[in-house]
Every structure is written in C-alpha cells, then in structure tokens.
Amino acid sequence: MDYKKLADLLFPDVKYTKEDLEKKYPPRNLKPGAIVTRFAPSPTGFLHIGSVFTCLVANNIAKKSDGVFILRIEDTDQTRKVENGVKNIIQGLNRYDIKFDEGVDEEGNDYGDYGTYTQSQRKDIYMAMAKYLVSEGKAYPCFCDDETAERDKAIQEANKELTGYYGSYAHCRDLTLEEVEANLKQGKKFAIRLKCNSSADHKIVMEDAIRGTLKLSDNFNDVVILKRDFLPPYNFAHACDDHFMRVNLVLRGDEYIPSIAEHLQIFDALGFERIKYAHIAPIQKMEGASKRKISKRKDPEANVTFYLEEGYPVESVKEYLYTVANSNFEDWRKNNPDLTCDNFVVTADKMSKSGALFDLPKLNDVSKNIISTFDAQKVYDLCLAWAELYDKSFAKILKDNKDYAIKVFSIERGTAKPRKDIAKWNETKSAFGYFFKELFAPKSLEDYAYNLEKFDKETIKKIVDKYVGVYDNEPDNQTWFAKIKTLGTEFGFADDMKAYKANPEAYKGHYGDVASMLRVAITGKANTPDLYQICTLLGKDEVVSRLKLASELLK
Ligand code: GLU
C-alpha cells in the first residue's frame, strides 16, 4: 500500500508537516527540573472547587520550579460551550491568585509562543498529525457509520466479546487504496483510526507522579483520533497539544487513568516523547459514613461562587485547599506562621491517592483562624466588599459608621489570643450586629438569650433596673466591674468567687451571673467580647436606653 498516496488523497491541503510543527514549537529553554503544566477546561463557565484545587496545585508546582503554567481551552465539543465561559473561569481562578503564563485571556485572545491555546482553532495541527500517521501506515480512514458500530456492539455483547473496533470488527483497517478512492468518490465521510498492535491481555506498567506504579490493561481498539468533522476526540488533542506546547507534566483528573494505555499508544505512534502524568483523585466529602465525590449537581459547595456568596476570604479557602493538597502543610504552617500559604511547596507524591476529604466545618475552623489574624481595617474592607454584593443594607450601615465599625472589629483583635468568632462575612451581621443601633431591635423576651431556667425574669429585671440608675461611663474595666459586683451583693449574689464556691447555698449566684444578665440585656447575646469594651463603644446613652428597653420587655 502506498501510504503517502493514501495520506494525500485524504488530506490534500494540509498546511504543515510534522517537521514544520516540531520547528514551530521547539523544546523550551528552561532550567532543569522546571515543570510545564496546564489547566485545560471546557468553556462551560462552571468552575468547580476541584478545579481551583487542581489549579492551585498545578500553579504552585509550575511557579516553584520556574516552569510554565498554561491555560488551554478544550472546546472541541461545541455543545458544551457557554457565553462568557472562558471569562468566568479565568476570573474565578484569578480570585485565588491563579495566573497563567500562557494561554487565552478573558476575551479569548492568545498570549504565549505555543498557541493558539484554543483547541477549535488548532484543526490544522490535528489534521497535519493525522496525515502524518496515515502516511506512516499507522492510521487509516474509517467509513463505518453509526449503525455499523451499533450492530457490532450488539453482536459483541450477545457473544460476550469485548466491545470495540478491533480484529474482524475493524472493517476499514485493510481497505485498499482503490476502495478508499471509491468511497471518497461517493462522498462518504470518514474518521481516522489509529492501528492498534496490542491486545486486551497485554498489560502495561507506568509511573504516575501521584499514584506511583500503575499496572493497566493495554488498549486493543483501533481508536478514533480524528472525527468525521476533522476535530479530534480528547485522546489525540491531548497528545498533539501537550507535545507541541512542550508540557512535561500532565496534571489531570483520575478519570483518565483507564485511557492511559490508549494515550501512550498515540504518543508512541506519533513519535512523541512520553510525558509524565499526575492523576489527581477528585476531592471528596462525607455522606453518612462513606466518602463520595463533591458533585456539581448535589453540592452547592462544588461551585466556586458558593465561597464568594458565603463570604469566605480567599486566604481561607486557599489555606484550606493547601491542607487538603499535602498532609505536611499543617506542620509547615506551624513552623511558618507568618508566611502566606503560597510560600508552601506542593509535592505531587504527597497528594492523596484516593481523594482528599474536603469538609465545610474544617474550612470554617481554618477560616476563623485566618480571619482572627486580620487587622480591623482588613476585616472592615473585606466585609464591606462582600456586603456591597450580597447585603446592601448592611453595607450602608458599615459605610455610614466606618470609624465605629473599625473600632467594633478591633475588640479583642491583635492580641495574643484573638477572638475567633467568624468564619465568613455572612456571619458578621449576626456576630456583631448588636453593636449597631440600626440592627439591634429586640421585640420580645424571645429576642434575648437570658438563662431563664437559672434566674427568673423578676430577678433579672430588678438587677437591670438597678443598673440603669447607677450606670455611668467608667474610667476602666476594674471600676466598671467593681460596680457590678457591688450591685450583685444587694440582691444576694456573691462578689467573691472563693466565698461563693465554699458556700454556694448562701447565695443566689455570683457576680459572673450578674454580668451575664447585663450582657444579655445590653447585647441580646449570651456570648460576646468583653462587655466593658462594648459598653464603652456603645456610649452611656445607648447603654441606658438598651437597659430600659430590656426592663420593659422583662415585665
Ligand atoms: N478538558 C479536559 C477536562 O476538562 C482536560 C483534561 C486534561 O487536563 O487533560 O476534563
């Protein structure tokens, strides 16, 4: 068979030869060990938290090794394309400080020397390489239609044979040049298939950067590498793109593991050097007692917009994703409390093989810690930015009371043991709302967190009423607290903890109980930061008016 002639017949006007492409996209001149990797989304616009995770890892590995991180748009399945899909993905990733060295920008324009970076615009490359394989006798045109494929599948299933295009089912593998010519004359459309020289019982062994040694069944099918529209399926695009973009680490989801054998056959047939793979297991969540993938359909936290809407700071999500990525991150963090998490160096072989667990309560803990390290101005700025998008009336209150709000956020912040009361900005209003007149509006006793099982409302009311009469701006915490203690003694509450503990029956309670009642009366809440600081910030008029309101509602 004259394969060269066959190739010219099938692809009369292909732009490049393999040599042209090897020259056009030369090996990169990078320092030894530099990793070139890529993120290759379909432009669906949906950004899964798992993609942010993968990108954080890939970006880290590329940047720390002085390598290159590429954004490639895999849009050969045009049905999945969504308006602004690319833009949404890029903006979503930029929020997490993930920036690409090469790829497409928000408008879809290329930057970098190894483009174009959009698959639908790379048809010339795929056709050139398919032609090359045909001319080498390694690939052939297949004229079979869908009905033939369905009929063969039914026969194979009935006979309990492996399904696919192989052996006697590979109808077009041995077509003569004349048969091909005749088909073309009839205007029949063709796909291109790779000639497979292996069998199902053959095993291959490969090294995965995350999984270690993998032993896999070989591919036995003559797989399609170019579809009838001359666009490639994933397998062939992956080989051509990653080779000509001179990628040296393919970081991708582990759903591709069963196709590795097929991919390696394509690389070998093309005469491309094989590329190292790192197959990442999808991040998991617990459902009952078992783990499962975080699902776009079932779990709101799958979508990155969830974190934005809830108001998780970027630092918190990143910090948590690093803990999920590498088990040694938490030790690193203990030793490097002041560095930003991006200083950590991710290593592929320390990633989970089975899928790291991602859970929101843990993220909340991490985030509380992170927010506790922010200064009050930063809390104000980030909270306001969040509120401007998701809680306009709260944003107005924050803006109208800027200095006051910063003072509120300063309470017990910047100390050795800062308060860890909020994990995300949508908790700020419920945590700090009582500081703002506009937000403190109890209507009945239910709006207060009194412990009515311990003390009846008559007792509380008496104490509140008494405190209204004596409350004043006090010079310091001690003076303020002494007043509360004294007040308590008038109602049978101990002003000395030792004395109380020695003989609790002799008292109604102790000064801590008195302070608790007043805390609830003034803030509505049982747990707050230091009450003296709160009262100082609120000012005498407001404290007194709140005590009066509390008294009213205690009637
Ligand atoms: N477009 C593929 C996907 O989104 C890319 C896989 C890869 O990284 O090779 O699954």
Image (tube, rainbow, N blue to C red):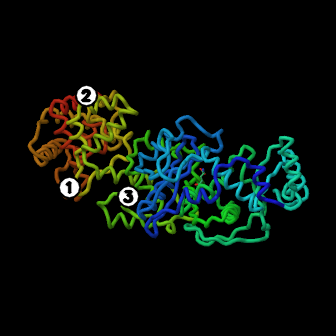
User: Does residue 289 appear in this view?
Assistant: no
| Viewer-nearest of discs 1 and 2 | 2
Q: Residue at x 74, y 67 (%)?
A: 218
Task: For ligand 1, tell me if the residue under mark 1 lies within 8 Å.
Answer: no
x, y percent for residue 394: 33, 31
Horizontal side of residue 2 vs 452, given as left or right: right
Q: Earlier in the sequence, mark 3 or mark 1?
A: 3
Residue under circle 3? 342
Horizontal side of residue 87 vs 511, given as left or right: right
Residue type marked 2 = Leu
Residue under circle 2? 549
Secondary structure, mark 2, is helix
- How far apart are the two marked residues, 2 and 3, measured between alpha carbons? 50 Å
Residue type marked 3 = Asp
Residue type marked 1 = Met
Secondary structure, mark 1, is helix
Instruction: Check whether the beta carbons of the residues at disc 2 and disc 3 lie within 8 A of each other.
Output: no
Q: Residue at x 45, y 42 (%)?
A: 91
- How far apart are the two marked residues, 1 and 2, measured between alpha carbons? 30 Å
- Label 3: how many residues lie within 10 Å, few (<14), some (14-19) or many (20+)? some
| Viewer-nearest of discs 2 and 3 | 3
Q: Earlier in the sequence, mark 2 or mark 3?
A: 3
Residue ranking furthest to the left: 475
Residue under circle 1? 497
Which of 130/90 is in front? 130
